[in-house]
Amino acid sequence: MKYNIITPGVLAHMKTIVGAEAIITQHADLEKYSHDETEDLVYYPEVVAKPNTPEQVSALMKLCNDNRIPVTPRGAGTGLSGGALPVKGGLLIAMERFNKVLEIDEQNLQATVEPGVVTEEFMNQAAAKGLLYPVDPASKGSCFIGGNVSHGSGGPRVVKYGTIREYVLNLQVVLPNGEIIWTGANTLKYASGYNLTQLMIGSEGTLGIVTKIVVKLVPLPTLDALMLASFPTNEAACKAVSAIFRAGIIPSALEFMERRGVEWVKEYDDIAFDLKDGVEAFLLIEVDGNNQDVIFADCEKINTVLEAHDCSDVLFADSSAQKEELWRLRRTMAVSVKSNSVYKEEDTVVPRAALPQLIKGIKETGIKYGFESVCYGHAGDGNLHVNIIKGNMSDSDWNHKLKDGIKEIFELTVSLGGTLSGEHGIGLVQKDFMPIKYSNVHFVLWKGIKAVFDPKGILNPGKIF
Amino acid sequence: MKYNIITPGVLAHMKTIVGAEAIITQHADLEKYSHDETEDLVYYPEVVAKPNTPEQVSALMKLCNDNRIPVTPRGAGTGLSGGALPVKGGLLIAMERFNKVLEIDEQNLQATVEPGVVTEEFMNQAAAKGLLYPVDPASKGSCFIGGNVSHGSGGPRVVKYGTIREYVLNLQVVLPNGEIIWTGANTLKYASGYNLTQLMIGSEGTLGIVTKIVVKLVPLPTLDALMLASFPTNEAACKAVSAIFRAGIIPSALEFMERRGVEWVKEYDDIAFDLKDGVEAFLLIEVDGNNQDVIFADCEKINTVLEAHDCSDVLFADSSAQKEELWRLRRTMAVSVKSNSVYKEEDTVVPRAALPQLIKGIKETGIKYGFESVCYGHAGDGNLHVNIIKGNMSDSDWNHKLKDGIKEIFELTVSLGGTLSGEHGIGLVQKDFMPIKYSNVHFVLWKGIKAVFDPKGILNPGKIF
């Protein structure tokens, strides 16, 4: 695809659309928009625009479509697959001024929010009204809800509450030609026409730019319990996961952490946590609800399952401070691990009973290719984040040989009934691995759909496929 | 779109694909496949084929695609929008021999089923293993799970458990050109490529033919309570609906029924139910779980809400026999109403707090256009089925004037933030109403997507748009 650069005439037009003060062209000011949280990749846009109305986004899209200028939408830049990197230059549309919670509708348990709202801020506003918005990625304190929509985001509570896919009811979207549509209706379900709402979710900003989001809310549970279970091996911890569900319990979170990850959190974040010898893996298990007896009973049942699965120790958090600290162990893990070394983060997902085989295979692949990995993630969903650490690996092995190792990890993932990316998306950095799972038929369908929405291919080019 | 008829040569080829015994061509034998549960519409296919493997479906599709012969897939024929009617003749592919539950995976709480499995049979098999498949349309005793996928089906328990959209993990699909693909992975979530699984759900058999379905299951709740609340007016009943959720309760079912519907059930099904004077509407409310105290407490809370909303009487079912009888009132309502008269069933869905305005408007429209309607449905989802009864209406008014009345009902629905069809689909009979909600931009996108999957337009032509 051949694109044009932004001429002075087009730039002047952009300034009339959003105002000169909402346009960035200076190299130093563009730096912030040249990277996200994906490895150490850097791509500069030619221009950044910061619109704050759907009409402005529409006018920018129309202008770029008419002039065949690539457009990359950007949320908070917390993505891990490079979805917000402007790899073809052009215009970057920063959604940070779409930062309002427009309505929390207590009658219908719905809310309408702009895409640039920080996820946790919205969660807090909903909670203040006794309502739960449960989609809380680890980056909830900084990520935008619009980015969550684009990636079909999950987080720890998916295991009970589902991904963002189950909360988004309706989306206002600006298409590449500038048309503004609502994808569906503000209803809990509908069956009229192909579901454009669901098609937009997880499309990584390649089909349209989301400008309003209507989500479902649920009553906020009033109680929870949190326990940390220690295991002598990764596999023992992973085996316990499916057994918990089989016992009839659906925890509100069921997270896996490797010992090495906890060690690095302790170094990075100075958390006072007594890491015992012989413990190699942890499950962080939360149960929520509105009745203390039920929560205790669930914890008892989980404890029985854990004991039957080689669990060496269970720590029950006995205060909200302790809960906070245990959650910090998990939530700080990504940044702690990454602060140690150059890294690559791979996102795998399998049917949850296949987790023991997956983690065993990951470690074997690491030995074969000479890399260290630190794994953690949403074990209840079968979703394991694999952080590969450069450490002492040579640049040559890191840049070339490692790719074969990652390929083997994804081949194993697919052979276990899984796929690449449970929630991080494909973006730029996972594209090459897509053929491991998907056939040419899938690519023909995906590219066909892309061409329907974006015939000139201007929107977030170079992503997914 | 110009189609060809099935020549003797093509017919002979079809017989080699599925065996002569699985081909129907006699007019009398075709009759069963010429109608579904939609009004009194009749369209004969030229030929019916009953394949029983994906490869047979693939060969049939390829043959029809090469020869530009229209193909209509059919599940159990319980549809209410004409989705399975072979309006262009051609080949009807009856999926009734795809009738096996292939696996119930107790480790992963998943199952793989063929599309011709009767929904209730699958539910029962899952329940026998302590697992719940909660998507139970009123027709669960006869509908196929494949048809449920095609319509994005719901049912009473959507209100707590979600529609089929939240249970389907992966689909095996035969595309119009005969290619066989799996849409996704057998995982609880994934974020790789546009979500073809979700795109297929609710596409009413126009994008591909589903040949295997992988669904999520959840632990079966062990207890439930059922109550029937009586109200002096429809609007009072509808107003209570959103208040129940606002009190922090998510019932496992919250159904609305009009008095007239209950009267007709009593006539049709000979149910011993004491219908008191002054009662105009009912809510049937179920709560489920695993703890009797919690269920009682929820019932108490609901009762408090009901009392504050003009509820005149609450009947708690005190035995499973009584529960069964109350559920029969609701489940038999569609067939009871329809046995009385020629009818049209319209499917509306709004944000649930808008239900009082919706039902008020429906009744006013009925007075204006001279039709009687009986309403019932999944009030907890804001989903109201509107059965319009011909009764004494003249043929001329029924065939012409009524359409304007229905249009007004949908205009009201849309103005309240809703849309046409919560779960019945658009099929043949709702097509004309689609422009009330959707713009030309939507139609361009939908038709573009259709052309990507089915460039020759052979699959289920004449449906949705």
Image (tube, coloured by chain):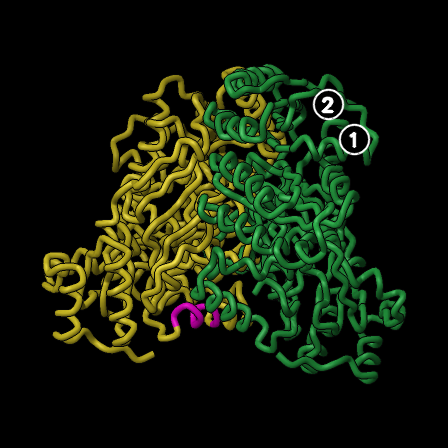
Chain colours: A yellow, B green
Residue type of the residue flagged with mark 1: Lys
Judge whether A245 appears above or below A118 on screen. Answer: above
The answer to whether mark 1 and mark 2 are in CB contact below 8 A is yes
- Residue B460 percent location from the top left of the image: 66, 67
The local secondary structure at tag 2 comes to loop
Residue B75 in sight: yes
Mark 1 neighbour density, 10 Å: few (under 14) some (14–19) many (20 or more): some
Circle on res. B388: none
Label located before the other in sequence (1 or 2): 1
Residue A313 in sight: no
- Chain assignment, label 2: B
Cα gap from disc 1 to disc 2, whole angstroms: 9 Å
Most foreground residue, B362 or A201: B362
Q: Which residue is mark 2?
A: B275
Residue type of the residue flagged with mark 2: Leu
- Residue B146 percent location from the top left of the image: 69, 54
- Residue B374 percent location from the top left of the image: 66, 39
**Magenta stretch, residue numbers:** A448-454
Q: Main secondary structure of the magenta part?
A: helix
Mark 2 neighbour density, 10 Å: few (under 14) some (14–19) many (20 or more): few
Circle on res. B266: 1
- Residue A183 percent location from the top left of the image: 44, 55
Q: Decide whether residue B60 is among the magenta residues.
A: no
The local secondary structure at tag 1 comes to helix
Residue drawn at point x = 54 percent, y = 73 percent: B451
Most foreground residue, B412 or A357: B412
Residue drawn at point x = 68 percent, y = 43 percent: B137
